Amino acid sequence: MIWLKLKLHMIPSISQEVDHVTQLYESLLNESSNKEKLKELLLLQVSIRGRIQEFEDLFEKNYENPLIVHFEKQKLRLRKLLQKEPIKLITPPSEPIKAPNPQKPITTDDYIKDVIQKNVKRSNTPPPATQAEWKELVFKIKLTKEEYGKLLNLKAKRNKIL
């Protein structure tokens, strides 16, 4: 997709461009069962993502300009457009769906007993403990002669104090 160059004075043209892209995108979504149309749709999505990035770059450069709000609106329209998914063909299930077996309604007494049993089981079992593995880290530091000399002096001072 060839996009117009983003300039602050071109708000109406940019809006029309986004309208055109929206119509094109939705028509490709409806025809996404065709492989070529699907490829076109994917290419258009990539192009739209690039355009959104261009809108973001423009915003960073001109965030103080009150006209930038109109460009943000167009960016949001493009983002919303990318959220739409292609319509998938509905295929009938190969096997009929079985109705779930009707269960006997639970009584209040049974429910209370079940809750009590679950709480007793929870209180008897301790929470699972996670074990941390001890691993030794080895750092290698390269020092210049001056830095190494300073390090030795600091160690010597520390050893004299202790």
Image: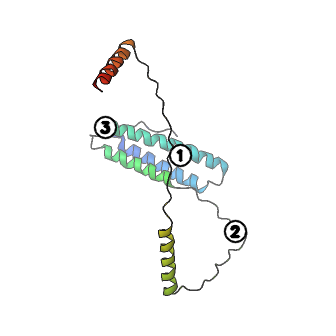
Pointer 3 with pointer 1, Cβ within 8 A: no
- For image coordinates 49% across by 63% down, the residue present is 126
Residue of label 3: 62
Q: Quadrant of residue 66?
A: top left
Residue 151: assigned label = none
* Relative image position of residue 144 (x, y in whole percent): 40, 14
Q: Nearer the viewer, residue 109 or 42?
A: 109
Pointer 2 with pointer 3, Cβ within 8 A: no
- CA gap, disc 3 to disc 1? 26 Å
Judged from the image, the secondary structure of the residue bearing numbered disc 1 is helix
Residue of label 1: 45
* Relative image position of residue 153 (x, y in whole percent): 32, 17
Q: Earlier in the sequence, mark 3 or mark 1?
A: 1
- CA gap, disc 2 to disc 3? 54 Å
* Relative image position of residue 86 (x, y in whole percent): 58, 56
Give amino acid for label 1: Gln
- Side of 99 where 13 appears, left or right: left
Q: Nearer the viewer, residue 51 or 158?
A: 158
* Relative image position of residue 69 (x, y in whole percent): 32, 46
Judged from the image, the secondary structure of the residue bearing numbered disc 3 is loop
User: Disc 2 vs disc 3: which is toward the camera?
Assistant: 2
Q: Earlier in the sequence, mark 2 or mark 1?
A: 1
Q: Quadrant of the C terminus?
A: top left
Pointer 2 with pointer 1, Cβ within 8 A: no
Residue of label 2: 93
Position of residue 118 relative to residue 55, above or below, is below
Q: Nearer the viewer, residue 124 or 38?
A: 124
Give amino acid for label 3: Asn
Judged from the image, the secondary structure of the residue bearing numbered disc 2 is loop
- CA gap, disc 2 to disc 1? 31 Å
